[in-house]
Image (spheres, helix red, strand yellow):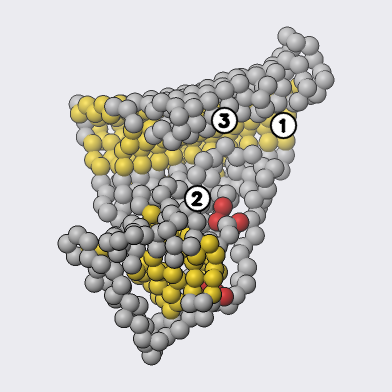
C-alpha cells in the first residue's frame, strides 16, 4: 500500500450500545508494505455508540514507513479494538512524513470519556522486529479508562535512532504492561531529535550579539589581548545583569540564558565563570550548559573546574579545583547557541529547559564569554516543521522501552525475557512517573549477558508524587560500562534486586 487507506469502525451517531464494528483480517501470502502515509485503521469516532473491531494481519515480512500506521483509536465511550500481527520474517517500522507524523502501530483511548484502549500483540518468533528513525509501537490512554498492553514474541528486537516501544497514561486510566520475549537478543541504541518539541526556540534570552566584544588584555580572560579571541564580560550583581553600563535585565531567582550566533565552522568558544565563589555574601556554586538553540541539543555541561584554567578570577576551593564553571570548546558548525547558567545541582537533557537550583537574588558572578566568528544581531532561528495536529506517542529523543505515567493513573510493568540485553549510546528503559500515578516494575530475565554501555539509562524514578517501581534483574553476566564523560546509570527509588545466575 502506498498513500492508501483501509478503514473500518464506527462513525458519529451510528450503531447501538452493544454494537461492535467489523474486524479487519488480512492474510498476505507474501510481504506487506505500507508507505507514504498509508493507513489501516479500525476507529471509533466521536459520538459513536459501541466498540471498535480488531485488526489481524498475517504476513511473511512487514514494512511500515513514511508516516504509515496500523491503528485502533476510540474517541467515544466504546473500547478500541486489539491489533495482532503474525509474521515469519523481518518487521521494519521507521521514518516519518515531512510534517512529522511518525510511522507506527498504535492503540489509543483518546479523550477523557473514551473507553479502554486495545492491546497490541506481535507474534514473530522466528524473525526480527526493527524500529528506527522515530518508528514506534505504542498504546496510550488519555482517559479514565486503561490503556492496552503490548506483548512481543520474537527472535530479535532492535531499537535504533529513536525507535521506541511505549505505553503511557496522561489521565486516571492505567498504562498497559510491556512484555517482550526475544529468544536471541534485545538491542537498544542511539537517538533521534527529529520533530522533538524544542522549548529553546521560544525562550527569552540575553542577546550577546548586541554587545561589543573586545580584545583588550584582561588577566581574568583566557586568550585576551592583541590577536586573541574577542570577549565580553557579563556581570550578575545582586540586582541586575549588566555589561559595563548596559543593563541586560533583572537578577531574579532564575536560570540565566545568553544567546549568540556563530558564522563559521570550527570556532572556539570559552565560557568562564569568575567570582561565583568568593567566600562571602552572594556565593553561588554555578553549573553551566551549552546548547544548540536551533536543534535543542545539549552540547556540553560543566560544574567545577581547575582553578588554573580560564585565567584568573576564581578562588581555589578544594585541591586544585574551584566551584566556578568553565567550558572551553570548539563549535563545529554555524548556528544560534545558548549558554545557560544554573546552580548546583541543576540538570537538563536534550530539548529541555534547565531544571533545579538557580542563582538567587543577591547571588553574584561574572561570566567571561570569548567567541571566534561571532554573528550579527538578529540572526533568525529555524522554523519548527512539526504539525501539532499529528499525534505521536513517542517520548524524548532516545531509543527505548517506556511505560510511563504522566497523570494520576499508574504506569505499566515492563518485563524482558531474552538471552542478551544490550544498551548502547544512550539507549533507554524507563518506568518513570511524573505525577501522582505509580511507576511500574522492571523485570529482566536475561540468559547470558546484560550489558549497559556509555550514556545509557535504566530507571524507575519518581519525578512527581507517585511511588516508584522495583527493578529486578536475573542474569548470568552483568556489565555496566561508562565514565565521567559517558554516564551510565541504573536508577530506582525502590529496591534493586540483582541475581547473578
The answer to which image quadrant residue 266 occupies is bottom left
Q: Is mark 2 on a helix, strand or loop?
A: loop
Tell me the quarter of the image containing the C terminus: top left
User: Which residue is rendered at x = 41% and y = 49% of the image?
Assistant: 357
Circle 1/circle 3 CB separation < 8 Å = no
Dot placed on the residue nearer the N-terminal end, 1 or 3: 1
Q: In the image, residue 242 lies at what x, y percent?
A: 49, 70
As displayed, is residue 256 above or below residue 374? Answer: above
Tell me the quarter of the image containing the N terminus: top right
Q: Distance between the residues labelled 3 and 2?
A: 19 Å
Task: Provide the residue designation for mark 1.
Answer: 6
Dot placed on the residue nearer the N-terminal end, 1 or 2: 1
82 relative to 422 in the view: left or right: right
Task: Provide the residue designation for mark 3.
Answer: 170
Residue found farthest to the top: 18
Task: Provide the residue designation for mark 2.
Answer: 352
146 relative to 99 in the view: left or right: left
Amino acid at each position: 500500500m502506498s498513500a492508501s487507506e483501509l478503514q473500518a469502525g464506527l462513525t458519529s451517531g451510528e450503531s447501538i450500545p452493544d454494537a461492535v464494528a467489523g474486524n479487519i483480517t488480512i492474510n498476505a501470502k507474501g510481504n506487506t508494505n505500507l508507505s507514504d502515509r498509508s493507513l489501516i485503521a479500525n476507529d471509533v469516532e466521536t459520538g459513536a455508540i459501541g466498540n471498535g473491531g480488531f485488526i489481524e494481519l498475517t504476513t511473511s515480512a512487514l514494512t511500515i514507513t513514511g508516516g504509515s500506521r496500523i491503528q485502533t483509536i476510540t474517541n467515544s465511550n466504546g473500547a478500541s479494538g486489539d491489533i495482532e500481527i503474525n509474521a515469519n520474517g523481518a518487521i521494519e517500522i521507521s521514518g516519518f512524513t515531512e510534517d512529522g507524523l511518525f510511522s507506527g502501530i498504535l492503540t489509543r483511548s483518546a479523550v477523557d470519556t473514551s473507553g479502554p484502549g486495545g492491546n497490541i500483540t506481535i507474534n514473530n518468533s522466528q524473525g526480527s522486529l526493527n524500529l528506527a528513525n522515530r518508528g514506534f509501537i505504542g498504546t496510550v490512554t488519555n482517559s479514565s479508562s486503561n490503556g492496552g498492553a503490548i506483548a512481543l514474541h520474537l527472535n530479535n528486537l532492535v531499537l535504533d535512532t529513536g525507535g521506541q516501544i511505549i505505553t503511557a497514561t496522561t489521565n486516571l486510566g492505567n498504562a498497559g504492561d510491556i512484555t517482550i520475549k526475544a529468544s536471541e537478543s534485545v538491542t537498544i541504541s542511539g537517538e533521534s531529535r527529529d520533530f522533538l518539541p524544542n522549548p529553546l526556540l521560544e525562550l527569552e534570552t540575553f542577546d550577546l550579539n548586541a554587545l561589543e566584544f573586545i580584545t583588550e588584555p584582561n588577566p581574568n580572560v583566557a586568550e585576551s589581548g592583541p590577536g586573541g579571541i574577542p570577549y565580553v564580560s557579563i556581570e550578575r550583581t545582586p540586582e541586575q545583569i549588566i555589561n559595563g553600563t548596559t543593563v541586560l535585565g533583572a537578577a531574579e531567582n532564575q536560570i540565566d540564558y545568553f544567546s549568540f550566533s556563530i558564522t563559521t565552522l570550527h570556532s572556539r568558544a570559552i565560557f568562564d565563570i569568575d567570582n561565583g565563589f568568593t567566600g562571602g555574601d552572594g556565593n553561588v556554586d554555578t553549573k553551566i550548559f551549552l546548547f544548540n538553540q536551533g536543534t535543542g541539543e545539549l552540547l556540553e555541561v560543566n560544574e567545577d573546574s581547575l582553578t588554573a584554567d580560564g585565567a584568573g578570577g576564581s578562588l581555589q576551593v578544594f585541591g586544585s579545583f574551584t566551584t566556578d564553571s568553565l567550558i572551553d570548546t570548539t563549535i563545529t558548525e554555524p548556528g544560534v547557541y545558548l549558554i545557560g547558567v544554573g546552580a548546583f545541582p541543576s540538570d537538563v537533557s536534550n530539548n529541555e529547559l534547565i531544571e533545579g537550583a538557580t542563582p538567587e537574588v543577591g547571588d553574584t558572578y561574572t561570566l567571561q564569554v570569548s567567541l571566534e566568528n561571532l554573528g550579527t544581531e538578529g540572526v533568525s532561528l529555524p522554523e519548527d516543521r512539526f504539525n501539532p495536529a499529528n499525534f505521536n506517542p513517542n517520548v524524548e529523543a532516545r531509543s527505548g522501552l517506556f511505560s510511563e505515567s504522566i497523570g494520576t493513573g499508574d504506569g505499566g510493568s515492563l518485563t524482558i525475557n531474552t538471552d542478551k540485553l544490550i544498551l548502547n549510546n544512550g539507549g533507554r528503559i524507563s518506568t518513570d512517573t511524573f505525577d501522582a500515578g505509580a511507576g511500574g516494575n522492571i523485570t529482566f530475565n536475561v540468559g547470558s549477558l546484560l550489558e549497559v554501555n556509555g550514556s545509557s539509562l535504566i530507571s524507575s524514578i519518581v519525578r512527581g508524587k507517585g511511588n516508584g517501581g522495583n527493578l529486578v534483574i536475573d542474569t548470568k553476566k552483568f556489565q555496566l560500562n561508562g565514565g565521567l564523560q559517558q554516564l551510565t546509570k541504573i536508577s530506582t527509588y525502590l529496591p534493586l534486586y540483582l541475581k547473578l545466575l
